[in-house]
Image (spheres, grey):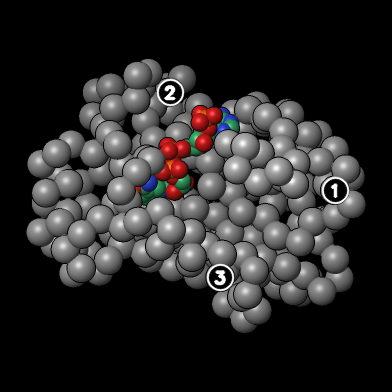
Amino acid sequence: MLRVEIEAVAARRLDLADSAAIGRELKAMADELGGVDVLVHAASVGSTCDPAKFDQIEDVTPQGWERMMAVNITSPFLACQTLTNRFEDEGGNVVFLGSIDGVKSVPAPVPYATSKGALGAMVKSLAKALGQRRIRVNLVAAGVLEAGASRTLPVALRAEYLKHCGLQRVGRVDELANVVSFFALSNTYVTGQTIIVDGGL
Ligand SMILES: NC(=O)c1ccc[n+]([C@@H]2O[C@H](COP(=O)([O-])OP(=O)(O)OC[C@H]3O[C@@H](n4cnc5c(N)ncnc54)[C@H](OP(=O)(O)O)[C@@H]3O)[C@@H](O)[C@H]2O)c1
């Protein structure tokens, strides 16, 4: 998609559930690009079921759970492990995408909330581990947006969200992107934090 919209973009297909491929493919991409300035990890699995739905506890299979954790937790760690070695001496920014499901006590699919909650702990510990190398690591946790991952949110829960959301509306994709852009491109002194973009839930 990015390649369609921006001609100069280089892109590779990578199955982030394939842990063995991540280091190899990302290393090859970093070699091709000649280094890395910023890592943003946004890909995510929202449901353990196929087709995707708002998982109930009884829907969750060990295989579905493992696939979600591979993409949502293992792949951000492996991407960080591989690519932060390629940052320049002046360091850089790592941004993961999280969710309020992993931060606040809201009705949420248990596997998804678990995976996003783990990212909150991961950014705190990575921030300490990578701080000496001037690498900042943060999590941008979204509420309900107009598109994307929130498509499996049941209608009643969406209405409940709007009732409790300070701004009384779902977020736009560009509103989340603006925050991610700041933490990816301009941030110099915030690290180990979860930044919540949920309109005030
Ligand atoms: N949209 C929201 O309301 C919302 C709310 C809270 C948090 N978030 C977070 O924001 C981030 C972006 O969300 P979104 O709305 O764009 O989600 P989305 O529409 O569900 O898209 C998920 C993306 O992850 C990719 N992906 C899934 N499994 C993959 C795999 N094994 N290997 C490689 N790529 C894989 C998908 O690629 P394919 O299309 O090729 O499958 C897709 O591009 C996610 O981390 C999500 O948890 C979003």
What residue would you read off at disc 3? 182
What residue would you read off at disc 2? 64
Of pointers 3 and 1, the one earlier in the residue sequence? 1
Depth check, front residue: 121 or 27: 27
Decide: is 116 above or below 67.
below
What residue would you read off at disc 1? 33
Residue 201 visible in the picture: yes
Please name the amino acid that badge 3 sits on.
Answer: Phe
For ligand 1, tell me if the residue under mark 3 lies within 8 Å. Answer: no
Examine the image and state in which quarter residue 74 appears: top right
Quarter of the image that includes the N terminus: top right
Decide: is 167 above or below 43.
below
- The residue positioned 70% from the left and 60% from the top of the image is 38
Q: Residues within 10 Å of mark 3 (few under 14, many from 20)?
A: few
Separation of marks 2 and 1 at Cα, in angstroms: 34 Å
Residue 129 visible in the picture: no
